[in-house]
Image (cartoon, grey):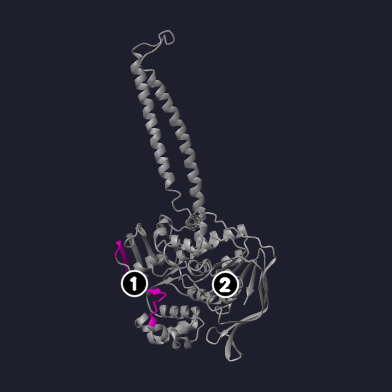
Amino acid sequence: MAQISVSNLTFCYEGSFDNIFENVSFLIDTDWKLGFIGRNGKGKTTFLNLLTGKLSDYQGHISASTVFDYFPYHIAEEQMEQCFAEFMEQLKPECELWRVICELEKLHLGTEVLYRPFRTLSHGERTKVMLAILFSGENDFLLIDEPTNHLDQASRDIVKEYLQQKKGFILVSHDRDLLDACIDHVLVLNRSTIEVQSGNFSSWWENKNRMDAFHEAENEKHKREIRRLNKAAERIREWADKSERTKIGFDPVKEHDRCLNTRSYIGAKTKKMQSRRTQMEKRIADEIEQKEGLLQDIERPVDLKIMPLQHHKEVLIAARDYGIAYQNGQKGGDAAESGCVIYKQVFQNLNFELKRGERVFLHGENGCGKSSLIKAVLARCVSDGKGLDGISAMQESGILTTASGLIVSYINQDTSHLRGTLKEYSRKNNLDESLFLAILRQLDLERVQFVKHMEEYSEGQKKKVLIAASLLKSAHLYIWDEPLNYIDVFSRMQIENLILAYQPTMLLVEHDVRFRERIATRVVEL
């Protein structure tokens, strides 16, 4: 067992206005299963890059006697056409094939994936192969950055079961179910501090809520004490000022017991009162200083708002014996021939209805047609369906209908189209700029990000842009395709509370188990 020591770490990117880390110090052991938790943009990936040496221009000290390896590996464009077995030693030197095969078996994957071009592998297969490479070494401390994004539920369960058997890693994830199952310590980037604590996500969250409640109570106690001291100081100030005014001049008829020699007595009495007032003000300043330190790390998620429209029809989407196939090579499935063109079936004989007020989750393996079904629905809502990728290659069977005049607010799982500033984006999409920025602030996007180009954003920050734009659009139906990839756990909880409060009609694809359990009124299996 070795230790990784971080002392007085301060780091900011060149040209940035704010520090990512400032005088940060903590210790972690290399045999821990450490979960890394924090808001989007707080510096989780940055810290992993500091450990691996990709970023070296920092102040302070990072001491470690171990070798770091990072997931996901960067796959170069020329490697996309190669088999994994050909270039895996470039990713992890001295990697032995037999060890990789052993790890693949634990991930329920056959060795044939090592001999297929990397481009042909699914998201789940790529993740599992890279994890097998990652864990095939010895005595490395592994840095695992969001391994379950874009994975279906079956693949997530396999990765979760696999990581449960391992130790000696830092796991960055916003999936509460994965964190609870796989970690024994947490490293948390709070608003103003960093803490290391034993336990999983749920135990940390329970402790945090308990500590937040204690700090809130202490804060209220300090506020009451400050109010009491302010009133006492005000009384003493009035008495001292009144006494000061009586030092010079007096009415010998009304104040027959006073003489000129009393002036020195009144002056001494006033001075004593002013001293008491100064002491009182010092106590008030001390109370305020103590109070200000209490609430610095409390997460206060702002309640988001949404303006759903009510459609006059009860059923908004209806599918009867509906199916989708793609031209050969577009999608996997059973081959079907239509004229001279070969089609591969994605799914068929689907029957379901989406009624007003329902929140229906599409569930199934990657490639089962969830996103294809969403595109088919959008294609029937003319304003949203124009120019959707893959629609021209799609062959449909059965019946799929949508209510007339249906207004849809859509979140695509792809963020690559985000370019330029937030101001340009809001203008291009006819969004009220001030409301758009206000929602982003409520999702904890720092104001300093407002002047940056979106190409500089983290993936989580880009997702928040799409979510804010969707929330700003009043719609009958909200269609969200994997909206929570890269989104931090605090924002996930905000979005859960929003949906439960406003109950919009929704069609969603999302693999976060906790989110689905809280939000779904129905799950449609594909």
* Classed neighbour count for the residue bearing mark 2: other residues with Cα under 10 Å, few (<14), some (14–19), many (≥20): some
Give the vertical position of 355 relative to 436 (above or below). below
The image shows residue 101 at horizontal and vertical percentages of: 45, 85
Q: In which quarter of the image is the N terminus?
A: bottom left
Would residue 157 be seen by someone viewing this image from the given angle? yes
| Horizontal arrangement in the rendering, residue 70 relative to residue 362 (left or right) | left
Q: Residue furthest bottom?
A: 340
Q: Which mark is residue 474?
A: none
Q: Which of 205 and 377 is in front in this view?
A: 377
Looking at the image, tell me whether mark 2 or mark 1 is earlier in sequence order. Answer: 1
Q: Quadrant of the C terminus?
A: bottom right
| Horizontal arrangement in the rendering, residue 496 relative to residue 403 (left or right) | left
Q: Give the range drawn in magenta.
A: 57-77
Secondary structure of residue under mark 1: loop
Q: Which of 204 and 277 is in front in this view?
A: 277
Q: Which residue is identified by label 1?
A: 66
The image shows residue 242 at horizontal and vertical percentages of: 41, 22
Q: Which residue is drawn at 47% across and 41% down?
A: 222
* Classed neighbour count for the residue bearing mark 1: other residues with Cα under 10 Å, few (<14), some (14–19), many (≥20): some
The image shows residue 412 at horizontal and vertical percentages of: 52, 70
User: Which one is closest to the eye, mark 2 or mark 1?
Assistant: 2
The image shows residue 111 at horizontal and vertical percentages of: 47, 87
As for residue 266 lying within the magenta part, the answer is no
As for residue 65 lying within the magenta part, the answer is yes
Separation (CA) of disc 2 from disc 1: 52 Å
Q: Which residue is identified by label 2?
A: 385
Q: How many marks?
A: 2
Q: Which residue is drawn at 51% across and 71% down?
A: 413
